[in-house]
């Protein structure tokens, strides 16, 4: 994670770096030592960096960069919120395909006492 953080610090809004390039650079330099890095793994690492508050990593269509600009951070937060809403909408739709669990009526014990006792 530290290697990626140090690398991200070198990129700006004017010159971002995309997932494929991060993988290529990391794999070329460290692949034999640590194994191959995949694009989904980069996304998870970036998410962890953001989530732990280590760096203000901004993601654009062109790639990632670090920015301390409040406007960039606010825009990134807005984009993340929209993705959350979209994921929640998808969850709601998928839930309609789950069968509701049947609740069994409580079993009452029936005792039979004959009248001819």
Image: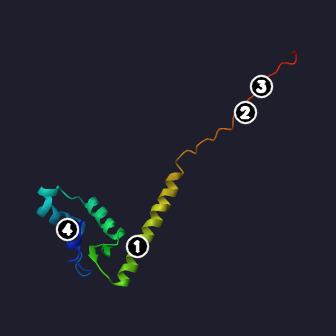
Quadrant assignment for the C terminus:
top right
Residue 79 placement (x, y as % from top left): 40, 73
Q: Quadrant of the N terminus?
A: bottom left
Give left or right: position of 7 versus 69: left
* Residue 51 visible from this viewpoint: yes
- Residue at screen point 24% across, 76% down: 16
Dot 4 or dot 2, earlier in sequence: 4
**Front residue of this view, candidates 72 and 30:** 30
How many residues crowd around disc 3 within 10 Å: few (fewer than 14), some, or many (20 or more)? few
Farthest front residue?
A: 117
Are the residues tagged 3 and 2 within 8 Å (C-beta)? Answer: no
Q: Return the residue at label 1.
A: 79
Label 3: element kind:
loop
Q: CA distance from mark 3 to mark 4?
A: 74 Å
Residue located 19% across and 63% down the image: 23
Q: Which residue is mark 2?
A: 108
Measured along the vertical axis of the image, is residue 75 above or below residue 98?
A: below
Residue 48 x, y percent position in the rendering? 32, 65
At mark 1, the secondary structure is: helix
Q: Nearer the viewer, mark 1 or mark 4?
A: 4
Whichever of labels 1 and 3 marks the residue nearer the N terminus, that label is: 1
In three-dimensional space, the C-alpha distance between marks 2 and 1, rounded to whole angstroms, equals: 55 Å
Q: Residue 31, position in %: x, y?
A: 14, 58
Location of residue 26 (image quadrant): bottom left
Q: Which residue is mark 4?
A: 3
Q: What element does badge 2 sit on?
A: loop
How far apart in space, not on screen, are marks 3 and 2 (Cα)?
A: 10 Å
Mark found first going from the N terminus, 2 or 1: 1
Q: Is residue 17 visible?
A: no
Question: In the rendering, which numbered label is found on residue 111?
Answer: 3
Q: CA distance from mark 1 to mark 3?
A: 64 Å
């Amino acid at each position: 994670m530290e290697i990626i953080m140090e690398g991200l610090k070198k990129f700006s809004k004017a010159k971002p770096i995309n997932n494929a390039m991060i993988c290529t650079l990391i794999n070329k330099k460290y692949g034999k030592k640590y194994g191959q890095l995949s694009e989904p793994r980069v996304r998870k690492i970036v998410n962890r960096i953001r989530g732990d508050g280590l760096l203000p990593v901004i993601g654009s269509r062109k790639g990632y960069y670090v920015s301390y600009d409040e406007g960039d951070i606010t825009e990134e937060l807005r984009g993340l919120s929209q993705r959350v809403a979209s994921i929640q909408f998808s969850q709601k739709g998928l839930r309609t395909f789950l069968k509701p669990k049947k609740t069994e009526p409580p079993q009452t014990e029936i005792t039979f006492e004959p009248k001819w006792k």
